Image: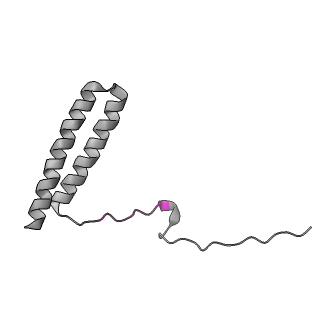
Amino acid sequence: MRLNAMVADLIKENRQLRRQVVKLTERGSSASSGNVERGLRTISRRVERALSGGTKRRRRKTTAASGNGRRKPATRRRKKSA
């Protein structure tokens, strides 16, 4: 029951944010509206992920240069005496 209320609040907040973005983009310059729209897309994505209920996490990709994915231990260099 509590989860349904939280989801309803998120949807309501998302609608309000979309309305605010529309108002700001109508008033603002093209450069600032791009930033606002990008922020809105980010918020929308987060809301959609929260509503989907998926707790799937992405695994970190290893680079080809690292070989098997393990890091080499740090080695200290000795100072040369003159």
Q: Position of residue 59 (x, y in %)?
A: 35, 65
Predominant secondary structure, magenta span: loop
The foreground one among 74 and 16 is 16
The foreground one among 78 and 18 is 18
Q: Residue at x 14, y 54 (%)?
A: 9
Q: Quadrant of residue 34?
A: top left
The quarter of the picture where the N terminus appears is bottom left
Asked if 72 appears above or below 37 in the picture, the reply is: below
Q: Residue at x 44, y 63 (%)?
A: 62
* 26 lies left or right of 6: right
Q: Position of residue 54 (x, y in %)?
A: 20, 64
Asked if 44 appears above or below 67 in the picture, the reply is: above
Residue 27 is covered by the magenta coloring: no
Q: Residue at x 92, y 67 (%)?
A: 82
Q: How many marks?
A: 0
Q: Position of residue 37 (x, y in %)?
A: 28, 37
Residue 58 is covered by the magenta coloring: yes
Residue range (magenta): 56-64
Q: Position of residue 24 (x, y in %)?
A: 27, 31
* 64 lies left or right of 78: left
Q: Residue at x 37, y 29 (%)?
A: 31
Asked if 69 appears above or below 14 in the picture, the reply is: below
